[in-house]
Image: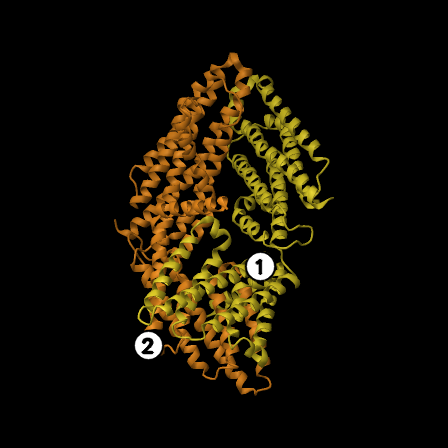
Chain colours: A orange, B yellow
Amino acid sequence: IFGLVLEVSNFFKKAWHLGHNEPRKVIHCLKVGMALTVVSLFYYTRPLYEGVGGNAMWAIMTVVVVFENTVGATICKSLNRICGTFLAGSLAIGIHWIASQSGDKFEPFITGISVFLLASAATFSRFIPSVKARFDYGAMIFILTFSLVTVSGYRVDRLMELANNRVYTITIGTALCTMITTFICPIWAGEELYMLITRNMDKLAYSLDGCVGEYFNGSGTSADGDKESDKKLLGYKCVLTSKATEEVMANFARWEPAHGRFNFRHPWKQYLKIGASMRACAYCIDALDCCVNSENEVPELIKKHMSNISLKVSSESSRVIKELARTMKTMKKSSTIDFLVGDMNSAILELQEDLKSLPNSFINLQPLQEAECPEKKNIGAVALMDIIPLVTLASLLIEIAARIEGMVDA
Amino acid sequence: IFGLVLEVSNFFKKAWHLGHNEPRKVIHCLKVGMALTVVSLFYYTRPLYEGVGGNAMWAIMTVVVVFENTVGATICKSLNRICGTFLAGSLAIGIHWIASQSGDKFEPFITGISVFLLASAATFSRFIPSVKARFDYGAMIFILTFSLVTVSGYRVDRLMELANNRVYTITIGTALCTMITTFICPIWAGEELYMLITRNMDKLAYSLDGCVGEYFNGSGTSADGDKESDKKLLGYKCVLTSKATEEVMANFARWEPAHGRFNFRHPWKQYLKIGASMRACAYCIDALDCCVNSENEVPELIKKHMSNISLKVSSESSRVIKELARTMKTMKKSSTIDFLVGDMNSAILELQEDLKSLPNSFINLQPLQEAECPEKKNIGAVALMDIIPLVTLASLLIEIAARIEGMVDA
């Protein structure tokens, strides 16, 4: 029993921690509670309740199902729900009319077959990638409403009224949700995406810097500071795993109205491209990290010889990434980025020259040099490889920066 | 107008293609249609309809919402729905009782505040990772049912009957769904996961083989065959992006009863570990591929010198992976895997020796050799790096194989 109490208290401690770290999530929860309470008012005020024919239940349901964390997600779901309901409702009424014309005997068969066919077709459409990305929820609502209305048609005579009430209540529910998410402490999917990308960029720069720096400066630091920096070094892992989040965000961001510094037709897809380039960078850093942490011993002499230029390459590269991050933050085309890319490229050329001159200066300890060559050369090579996606990223970002410039008129 | 027609016909062509390639998806759609039709029968047969007090609507709703592609997902959602409804229902009745005891004046306030508090708390719990992974849907249903029942309590007097009917209809709906998914052409999440992992393993082996092979054998093949093989070479990209799918599958697989060759407490988590190791391998292959496709020119002579041993390393490595895949397929501990790992390791040692001897045999063209060194050495180094996760993978899989052996008694 004591173990159970401990576990429960641990759970609450964790929950408190989560709430403390991300107050926006707590605010979101309070918003949900508020929306629900407001919608419950329908039950308590008689004129409103009678107005929707006692179907206030559907409004509550809509609020619970539609209310999401970000504005984009809420709007996307609301639109899906309204369109799905409306389409399915009209279709169902049409089919009900046909069925009622064909006599009592055939009615169950016609409705049954139509439910079977349309449910299958709508389910199938959810597997098509382009539909799934945007209208997955809408298709589900379509099936739901269609079968409900068609089947109820058999029992409830005032079908039109029922359908009308459903549309009213759902509209009320979605409107309320949209208003609350948009006006009370809104969390924009677009802004989240934007912050995720810039944060990841910073992490990437830090990882690249730290990884090479740690290798050349040795592990002479204290274990305590090491743990802290180790944690930061692994920042690139976040970049590796953020793909799914980015895609979801970009998908929702498209539904959001203009807000803050983002226009309505902000090029969200460009963010996905940047994310992909960043991931390619992160793969390279992973390989680099792997090779830095391998057990191969390298003679101090050569290490020293190479350290300056390698550090220079990595710091130039990470400076480019940081500058890109700053460009993203200010959303203006940076004037220094071209210089920085130039600096980086010249540093790489220098590194290549150095690699060429290596065998000449160490001709007397050649076997030794070769033994460590895979290790050393690899850093050069990986740094080189690192450059390819980096340059892609840079050119891509310059293009975006130009676009944003054109849009923001700044 | 012609453009529109073309687009629509294209859409249908794509849909047909999808259905043709994956007949199981079509079967799933038909299953959904069937479940809905069966549940609609409730409306047409009078005794059944009266039995649930005219609330057959909820059964339809349950079927639409709960029916998922895989057995695990359906069972998981069903259990979530039943538990959420039951818990919320009993809590709501309790609160309704308290509210009704406290007199007409306070009733709306008590219910309103309780809805606000519990909805906020339940929404917050959905942010906690451990709850989100398993009970996300259950928490949503909890909010929904709780607010519906609490609020209806104000208007509907026969609250107990209402709650009872809801539980009945939901049970009927979920039972129907579970039966149909399990007994008619079931799609098991566990089996999907297992197939995904073995398929990815094969792809990985092929990519590794092909990537190195293409580099050393040159691009002398015809453009037609090249495209085909290029497509296969990029198989490792699938491994890079399959993380999210694997996690979802493993999550659902835990809910499934024993089926086929899988016991109830099959170690699904081990699959995730294998997936992670495979992803580490894939990062390395990505770096390798990057470096093979770079523009650096390498003299033919050295290329030839290295080609034998490099090909040997890559083929030994890929043979290990393929053997692992076969081990997975048969679920028996392979007797040859230890030998293969040994072979691979000796091939690596050979490669290292070769790298050491390189400068001696090419001492006269040293500047040239150094110029291409980053390229060449890198292959050695990447192959080396490749080995680290590979060996991890191998040892991990041997352990799993042993476990599975213990479980399957084979």
Give the label on residue B75, or none. Answer: 1
Q: Position of residue B140 (x, y in %)?
A: 45, 60
Seen in the picture, residue B369 relative to B25 is either above or below; the reply is above
Task: Provide residue A157's location: percent of width, then percent of height.
Answer: 48, 84
Of residue B365 and residue A406, the one placed in the foreground of this image is A406
Q: Quadrant of residue A395?
A: top left
User: Between marks 1 and 2, how big is the CA–CA gap?
Assistant: 41 Å
Tell me where residue B384 appears, x and y as whole percent. Answer: 58, 29
SS at circle 1: helix
The kind of secondary structure element at disc 2 is helix
The amino acid type, in three-letter code, at marker 1 is Ile
On the question of residue A332 being in view, the answer is: no
| Quarter of the image where one finds residue A62 | bottom left
- Of A372 and B401, the residue lying toward us: B401
Across and down, in percent, residue A77 comes to: 42, 62
Numbered disc 1: what chain? B
* Outermost left residue: A410
Q: Amino acid at mark 2?
A: Arg
Whether residue A296 is visible here, answered yes or no, is yes
- Given contact means CB atoms under 8 Å apart, are the residues at marks 1 and 2 in contact? no
Horizontal placement of A61 versus B173: left or right?
left
Chain assignment, label 2: A
Labels 1 and 2 within one chain: no
In the displayed structure image, the side of residue A175 where residue B174 appears, left or right: right
> Which image quadrant for residue B403?
top right
Disc 2 crowd, CA 10 A, few/some/many (<14, 14-19, 20+): few
Q: Which residue is mark 2?
A: A46
